[in-house]
Amino acid sequence: MYPHMNAFGRVFSSFGLMALLAFLTGGLLTYLLAKKKGQIRADEALMAGLIAICGGVAGAFLLRPVIGLFEVLFNWQQFRDYPLDLLVGRFFGEIIFYGGLIGGLIATLLYCGRFQISLLPLLDLFAPTVALALGIGRIGCLLAGCCYGIEVRAGHVLAIRYPLYSLGAPPDVPLLAVPLIEATLLACLSLLLAIVYVKSRRAGLSAGLYLLLYPAMRFILEFFRGDVVRGGFGSFSTSQLLSLALFCLGIFFFVHRRGHQSNPIS
């Protein structure tokens, strides 16, 4: 594909440009939804979004080293003879979405606690935004050649071939276009969550739906990913285990909210 793009006489990273577009589009959607529903002030929502982005970027870069630490602890015999530069290259520099999601959530919690802002309406607002931003980011993955799919037969309708200079994908091999599939599903999910957010009067509904639908989608798509170097535990990838954890959190969230709303004392 196109890991680099030429614009204004300079060469830019395709993934970086799509990440920038994701942030800008996410901010615009946040502003429009906040104005549409009127539950949260648009300027307050945008400030919370900036804080969440800062936490998300930090978490996206930090999750891989944290996972790598556990890999070293559980497989010490395998890594004890690794040169230091190989260890650093293996466990640093990779961006993981779930790390960004966790980091963004922590930052949002701290922000809401500091300024006494209600958390659930903000999470409801962010749910469609996060889905849309990630979908745009997956287009960046498609262009760059990361997060690629398994090998499929030549002529497959969803097959894609990467050039020699892509970021990780084997060159000139028909691979399933998993990033494109995920981007399409995320666009649909973002639309659904945006409608739910605007129409629903129940706090936590769109956030809860995100916690159920995206992890389920991601868990299934992971079976079709070809970049197995990402690591995992047992038969599951790291992202699948995190998807299971978030899905369980979504179930707990809905059960807790139902019990809370049915009890007039709580």
Image (cartoon, grey):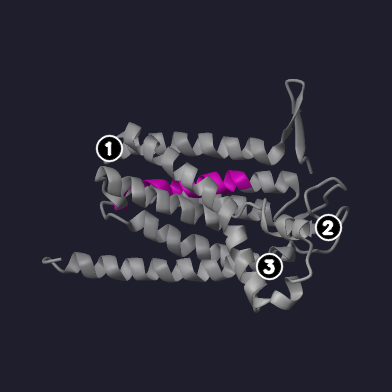
**Figure quadrant of residue 67:** bottom right
Residue at image mark 2: 174
Left or right: 37 in relation to 233: left
At x 75%, y 74%, the residue is 78
In the image, residue 254 above or below residue 118: below
**Figure quadrant of residue 229:** bottom right
Residue 45 highlighted magenta (yes or no): no
In the image, residue 174 above or below residue 34: below
Residue 97 in picture, x, y percent from top left: 57, 54
Q: Nearer the viewer, residue 245 or 80?
A: 80
Q: Nearer the viewer, residue 254 or 181?
A: 254
Mark 3 Cα within 10 Å, few/some/many (few <14, many 20+)? Answer: some
Badge 1 marks a residue whose secondary structure is loop
Residue 78 appearing in the image: yes
Amino acid type at mark 3: Gly
Mark 2 Cα within 10 Å, few/some/many (few <14, many 20+)? Answer: many
Residue 220 appearing in the image: no
Residue at image mark 3: 231
Residue 38's mark?
A: 1
Badge 2 marks a residue whose secondary structure is loop
Whether residues under marks 2 and 1 lie with C-beta atoms below 8 angstroms apart, the answer is no
**Numbered range of the magenta stretch:** 120-137
Q: Point out the tag, 1 or 3, that comes first from the N-terminus.
A: 1
Residue 2 in picture, x, y percent from top left: 78, 40
